[in-house]
């Protein structure tokens, strides 16, 4: 149902038969989703190095648009929350831009590791478009551990609170696309990174991915 809703929205709001334009190949596509400080950046960087794949952050699309509007990401997300029609158009265009990159496996078309809250959903969407070699992972972690990780980077607790609010607004907005970010049934593997070493996380993921 969610995928059909997304397909309908793309066809309605993106010009020129967008789904037919996707250049789909079957190079490896690995997605890593999760909340703040769950380890997404480390895991995607290590997987990209291990398998010799490109790296892409789904969140870069929204950050790019925020920069164009000369707004901080926090202010931009608040703005979108207050302007539903504009938010729908921006989210659909950002999502389609991400899908284009993921469908063809990066600029060199040799494969891609991508992270972001919606990365797994995009992976599932592309699977429904008959893209193969897609592997979706989700990282989880309790709030206290995530706070400790952020503070260990010389950041401030206010930053964590600000990011938490931003994520909540994102989550509410994505529901307009029919996406429940808390639905973990779409993933090939869900890992609690508070209970595992970095090596154990990587090894667990690699056990699911065939030789690429």
Image (tube, rainbow, N blue to C red):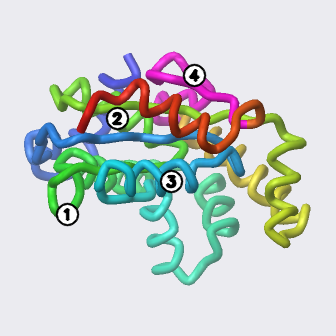
Q: Residues within 10 Å of mark 3 (few under 14, many from 20)?
A: some
Along the polypeptide, which appears first: circle 4 or circle 3? 3
Q: Which mark is residue 107?
A: 1
Q: Residue at x 29, y 32 (%)?
A: 134
On screen, residue 133 above or below 173: above
Name the element at disc 2.
helix
Q: Which residue is mark 3?
A: 87
Residue under numbered circle 4: 183
**Residue 91 location (% of width, % of height):** 44, 51
For this view, does 6 lie left or right of residue 206?
left
Q: Earlier in the sequence, mark 3 or mark 2?
A: 3
Q: Which residue is mark 2?
A: 123
Viewer-proximal residue among 146 and 62: 146
State the SS at label 1.
loop
Q: Which residues are magenta?
A: 176-193
Give 75 or 202, whichever is nearer the viewer. Answer: 202
Mark 4 and mark 1 lie on one chain; the one further toward the N terminus is 1
Whether tag 2 and tag 4 are in contact, CB under 8 A, the answer is no
Say what secondary structure mark 4 lies in: loop
Q: What is the spatial separation of the Cα atoms under label 4 and label 3, in whole angstroms?
A: 22 Å
Alpha carbon distance from label 3 to label 2: 22 Å
Which quadrant is home to the C terminus? top left
Do tag 2 and tag 1 residues touch (Cβ < 8 Å)?
no
Quick one: label 2, few (<14), some, or many (20+) residues within 10 Å? many
Residue 190 magenta-drawn?
A: yes
């Amino acid at each position: 149902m969610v995928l059909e809703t997304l397909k309908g929205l793309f066809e309605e709001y993106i010009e020129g038969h967008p789904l037919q334009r996707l250049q789909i190949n079957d190079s490896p596509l690995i997605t890593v989703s999760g909340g703040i400080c769950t380890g997404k950046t480390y895991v995607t960087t290590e997987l990209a190095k291990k398998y010799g794949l490109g790296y892409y952050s789904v969140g870069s699309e929204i950050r790019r648009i925020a920069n164009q509007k000369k707004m901080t990401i926090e202010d931009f997300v608040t703005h979108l929350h207050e302007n539903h029609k504009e938010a729908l158009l921006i989210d659909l265009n950002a999502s389609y831009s991400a899908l284009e990159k993921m469908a063809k496996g990066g600029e060199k078309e040799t494969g891609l590791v991508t992270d972001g809250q919606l990365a797994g959903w995009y992976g599932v969407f592309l699977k429904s478009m008959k893209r193969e070699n897609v592997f979706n992972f989700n990282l989880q972690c309790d709030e206290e551990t995530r706070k400790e990780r952020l503070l260990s980077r010389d950041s401030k607790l206010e930053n964590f609170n600000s990011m938490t609010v931003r994520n909540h607004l994102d989550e509410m907005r994505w529901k307009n696309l029919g996406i429940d970010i808390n639905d973990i049934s779409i993933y090939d593997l869900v890992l609690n990174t508070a209970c595992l070493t970095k090596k154990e996380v990587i090894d667990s993921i690699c056990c699911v991915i065939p030789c690429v």
